[in-house]
Image: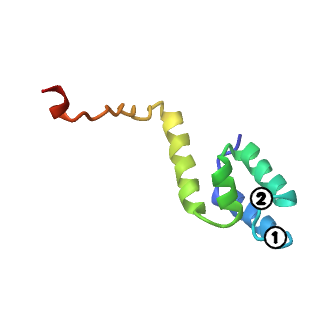
Amino acid sequence: MELLTREIANTYRDRAKALPYNGMQDIGERRALRIELQERCGVTELEAINIINGFHIDIYCMKYLIKAREAAEGTQEPAKKKRRKQYDRREFY
């Protein structure tokens, strides 16, 4: 899998612009383009749709750059704390 870069994202955005306008629906050639981007860079479906539509490209590139750097350094993502259910104390008294 390749690291998502601005050049890759812009290439897919430009390829999507060249397709016939269909309301930016995820069908036909646009869907094939999205799936290709997902398989190439390992992005989620929503991220791939946003990239080919030209939205949040810089944010997604930075996200995957940070993930790749953390994987290379061997640092782990901070563990998410489990949220506890809040009880009304009056229930118990």
> Where residue 88 is drawn, which disc sits there?
none
Horizontal side of 49 relative to 61 (left or right) equals right
Few, some or many residues within 10 Å of mark 2 (<14, 14–19, 20+) = few
Rendered image quadrant of residue 55? bottom right
Few, some or many residues within 10 Å of mark 1 (<14, 14–19, 20+) = few
Camera-nearest residue between 49 and 22: 22
Task: Determine whether 34 is above or below 22 in the image.
Answer: above
How far apart are the alpha carbons under marks 1 and 2?
9 Å
From the top left corner, tell me how far across and down residue 56 is, in percent: 57, 63
Horizontal side of 82 relative to 58 (left or right) equals left
Camera-nearest residue between 41 and 25: 25
Helix, strand or loop at label 1? It is loop
**Circle 1: residue type:** Asn
Q: Which residue is mark 1?
A: 22
Residue drawn where x is 79% and y is 66% of the image: 16
Residue drawn where x is 86% and y is 72% of the image: 20
Rendered image quadrant of residue 48? bottom right
Quadrant of the snapshot with the C terminus: top left
Camera-nearest residue between 11 and 55: 55
Q: Which residue is mark 2?
A: 26
Task: Determine whether 3 is above or below 24 in the image.
Answer: above
From the top left corner, tell me how far across and down residue 84 is, in percent: 31, 31
**Circle 2: residue type:** Asp
From the top left corner, tell me how far across and down residue 1 is, in percent: 71, 40
Residue drawn where x is 75% and y is 63% of the image: 11
